[in-house]
Image (tube, helix red, strand yellow):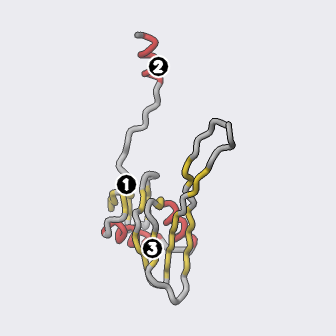
Amino acid sequence: MIQLLTEIEQLRVEPDQTARIVVDERSGIIVMGRDVRVSQVAVAQGNLTVTISERPQVSQPEPFSQGETVVVPRTNLKVDTGEKNKLALVGEGVSLRELVDGLNALGIGPRDLISILQAIKAAGALQAEIEVM
């Protein structure tokens, strides 16, 4: 019994937390948790187009290696600021980091990013709570 309690006491447990984005519109600060995900959504802002697509690929181990076959996500991110831009489609299950990286590559400022995140949330495609300070 003592050995069992010792092992249980040594276990590391990470509790589930609600995905959350904290925004301070005055200063332009945005803080995001790692569990924030974006469902499929279309995004357009001015001359900005963001396209995110995911093509899962299967990774198989060598024969007789006792490995496991797994599906590996292959995410493709394309950002365009051309004048003929239209509505862009953001693929299902894209992490917020991938979306933000694409917007940051264009030099999108924090205030515009806050507006885009709030619009994605209003569309029901952001799986996170937005807390405005």
Q: Which residue is drawn at 69% across and 43% down?
A: 62
Q: Which residue is drawn at 44% across and 59% down?
A: 93
Whether residue 94 sits left or right of residue 60 in the image: it is left
* Mark 3 residue crowding within 10 angstroms, few (<14) / some (14–19) / many (20+): some
Q: Is residue 53 above or below residue 47?
A: above
Q: In which quarter of the image is the N terminus?
A: top left
Q: Position of residue 112 (x, y in %)?
A: 43, 74
Q: Residue at x 44, y 70 (%)?
A: 113
Looking at the picture, which amino acid does disc 2 mark? Glu
Residue designated by label 1: 20
Q: Which-is-in-front pick, marks 2 and 3?
A: 3
Q: Which mark is residue 50?
A: none
* Residue furthest out toward the bottom: 83
Residue designated by label 2: 7
Residue designated by label 3: 89
Q: Where is residue 33 in the image (x, y as percent from the top left)?
A: 43, 53
Q: Is residue 4 above or below residue 55?
A: above
Q: Where is residue 108 in the image (x, y as percent from the top left)?
A: 50, 74
Whether residue 62 sits left or right of residue 94 in the image: it is right
- Circle 1 sits in a helix, a strand or a loop, which is it? strand
Looking at the picture, which amino acid does disc 1 mark? Arg
How far apart, in angstroms, are the residues tagged by discs 1 and 3?
A: 23 Å
